[in-house]
Image (cartoon, helix red, strand yellow):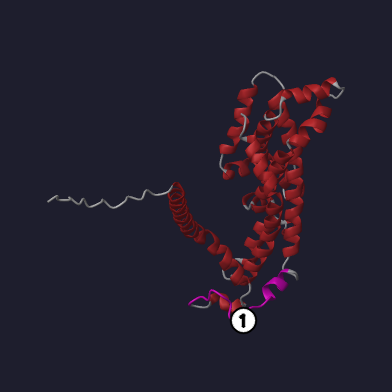
Amino acid sequence: MATTSLHRADPPTTAASPAGTAAAARRRRRLRSARRAALLSAAGVVLFVPLFFPLVWMLSTSFKPAEETFQVPPTFFPAAPTLDSYLSQLGDSGFLAYLLNGALVAGAASAVGIAVAVLGGYAFSRLRFPGKRTLLLVVLASQMFPLVLIVVTLYVLLRQLQLLDTYLGLILAFTAFALPFSVWMMRRFFDTVPRELEEAAMIDGCGRLGAMRRVLLPLISPGVIAVGLYTFMFTWNNLLFSLTLISSKDKRTVPPGFLLTYVGEYQYFWADAMAGSVMATMPMVVVFIALQRFLVQGLSAGAVKG
């Protein structure tokens, strides 16, 4: 009798398809990207909440009545929002005069700073003269001195020139402090432009100033705007120079005007001060938003070539 041996067949093995493997890999990558984005978002919230909380508190306090600003415990949102603090800034508080003085001084300092920084940066970038590198380092090293030391020297100098308590003296003081860094920045911007473009313009009949005005300045316009914005922001926000060099109330800029108007030994007008701070901050925010593209381009261009 013949016996038949039966063999159990092994179960078939199914290999994963290439399409299924690729889809699983994409899902894993998306999951890792989502986790990374969530971690970065959480870290951003942790870092920026302390940064923006004072701004939110300033805005909230500006809408509070005067008595609510001293309430204990404090209220985060005003119980009865009011515009009284904003309206008082447009009255007899002198706030508009502070804004106009600040705009005048900052605008003039920026214009003078740009003009001198462009010429100085061009000289350090294109001209050859003995001690150029040493002089450039000395110009930059002047930024290392504390403002307190610089303002004492400027006070003595302006007193001898009879420019104390004048717009011109304050403009010159701000320009003198901002100029070294501005010259250094403009020199780096000029270095990014090939010399061949300037030489071609000079061959076509332009002098140095003509080539700089027609060829170089349009190419480094983001750098010029960056220098002007740097000087404007420093001048607008500076307290020490304005407080020391200006004594007349009608010539004060925003920082000393706020300090001497809203804060005193026996009085604190917090709601008015916060409303004024919001109104004084808005011009800088608008200017920065409008010019931030040029500022980033200018700083990036200045970092390309030393």
Q: What element carries label 1?
A: loop
At which x and y percent is residue 103? 75, 54
Which of these two is toward me, 266 or 1? 1
Residue at (60% x, 28% y) in the render:
137
Q: Answer with left or right where residue 194 lies relative to residue 303.
A: right
Q: Would residue 189 be counted in the magenta stretch?
A: no
Q: Magenta-highlighted stretch: main secondary structure?
A: loop
Q: Which residue is rendered at x = 81% and y = 25% of the image?
A: 208
The picture places residue 228, in percent across and down from the top left corner, at 71, 44
Q: What residue type is labelled 1?
A: Ala
Q: Identify the magenta region.
A: 73-89
Q: Is residue 303 above or below residue 253?
A: above
Front residue (pair 275, 207): 207
Question: Residue 75, position in %: x, y?
Answer: 53, 76
* Residue under numbered circle 1: 80
Q: Is residue 264 visible?
A: no
- Dot 1: within a 10 Å radius of its alpha carbon, few (fewer than 14), some, or many (20 or more) residues? few
- Give the percent coordinates (x, y) of residue 289: 68, 54
Instruction: Specify the quadrant that holds the C terminus.
Output: top right
Spot the residue most to the right. 205
Residue appearing at x 56%, y 42% in the figure: 146
Quarter occupied by residue 84: bottom right
